[in-house]
Amino acid sequence: MTLTKADIVAEVYAKGLLSKAEAADAVERSLELIKEALAQGEEVLVSGFGKWSVRAKTERRGRNPQTGDPLTLPPRRVVTFRPSRVLKARVQGEEVDVAAALAAEDKAQGEGNDKGRALRPGYF
């Protein structure tokens, strides 16, 4: 099953703190902040979840899969995602000390890297 934006809005609404319209606005604004940051080339860190970043790919040689003719693929920017230790452990079904993992991520993020935005759980 795929988790959709509508499912996220419904879950936020189900917590009972926001109306359905407010929940939809909060989710939409959160995603818009992430998109804006990535479009500007910034990194986005959501502690306990992961980090999105933009990577530049250089021009490269490729081929047309139908004809086999060689062609040049232009340079482009791609979005990459690196899951946090907390998320990796949760996906694997392992127990994890969330406080220690978040502290380690915060320490690693703070070492010489101030070009991204960090969002803490409960930030919204």
Image (cartoon, helix red, strand yellow):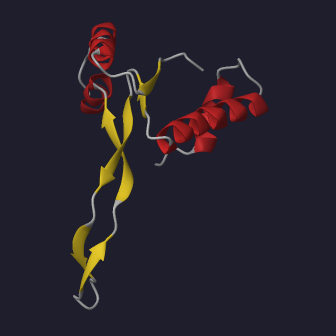
Q: Closer to the camera, 6 or 111?
A: 111
Expressed as whole percent of the image width and height from the top left, the position of residue 55 reads 33, 46
Q: x, y percentage for residue 115?
A: 40, 27
State the residue at coordinates (65%, 21%). Answer: 15
Could you say where residue 71 lies in the image, as x and y percent from the top left?
27, 80
Residue at left 51%, top 36%?
37
Picture layout, residue 21 above or below residue 67: above
Closest to the observer, 21 or 114: 114
Percent from the top left, x then y, of residue 116? 42, 27
Q: Is residue 7 left or right of residue 114?
A: right
> Does residue 36 sit above or below 100 in this rendering?
below
Residue drawn at x 27%, y 30% is: 88
22 sits left or right of 86 in the view: right
Q: Quadrant of residue 97?
A: top left
119 left or right, relative to 124: left
Q: How many marks?
A: 0
Identity of the residue drawn at 60% across and 20% down? 124
As drawn, the residue found furthest toward the bottom would be 67
